[in-house]
Amino acid sequence: MNKHQDESFEEDFDEEEYDDMELLERLETLREDMEELNVRTLDDVIQQIKELHQKLDAKA
C-alpha cells in the first residue's frame, strides 16, 4: 500500500468509525426514551401512538 492508499484507508476507517459512533449514540438515546416511556418493543410504541391518536381524535 502506498502513502495515498494508506491515507484513503484511514479516512474511510475514520468515516466508518464516526458512522458507528453516531449510530451507537442514536440507539442509546432510543433505549433511554423507551425506558422513560415504559415501552419495550416497537409494537408497544405503535400501540401507544394509535391510542393517543384515538384519544386526540375523540376530543376534536
Image: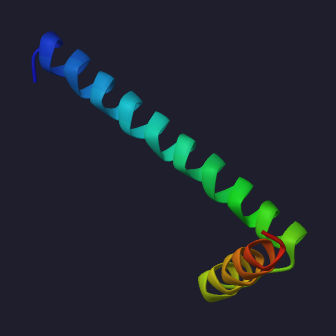
Using the rendered view, name the quadrant where residue 13 is placed.
top left
Picture residue at 31% right of the left edge, 22% below the top: 11
Q: Residue furthest front?
A: 60
Colouring mode (rainbow / by chain / secondary structure / one colour)? rainbow
Residue 19 appears left or right of 32: left
Q: Which residue is more in the foreground, 44 or 14?
A: 44
Q: Is residue 58 above or below residue 22?
A: below
Picture residue at 65% right of the left edge, 47% below the top: 25
Q: Is residue 56 above or below residue 47?
A: above
* Quadrant of the snapshot with the N terminus: top left
Residue 36 appears left or right of 3: right
Picture residue at 16% right of the left edge, 11% below the top: 3
Numbered disc total: 0
Q: Is residue 51 above or below residue 34?
A: below
The x, y position of residue 26, in whole percent, is: 62, 50
Picture residue at 10% right of the left edge, 16% below the top: 2
Using the rendered view, name the quadrant where residue 12 is placed.
top left
The x, y position of residue 24, in whole percent, is: 59, 52
Q: Which residue is more in the foreground, 22 or 41?
A: 41
Using the rendered view, name the quadrant where residue 30 is placed.
bottom right
Q: Which residue is more in the foreground, 47 or 19?
A: 47
Q: Is residue 6 above or below residue 27?
A: above
The x, y position of residue 19, in whole percent, is: 44, 40
Residue 35 appears left or right of 6: right
Q: Which residue is more in the foreground, 40 or 51?
A: 51
The x, y position of residue 35, in whole percent, is: 85, 72
* Quadrant of the snapshot with the C terminus: bottom right
Q: Residue furthest left?
A: 2
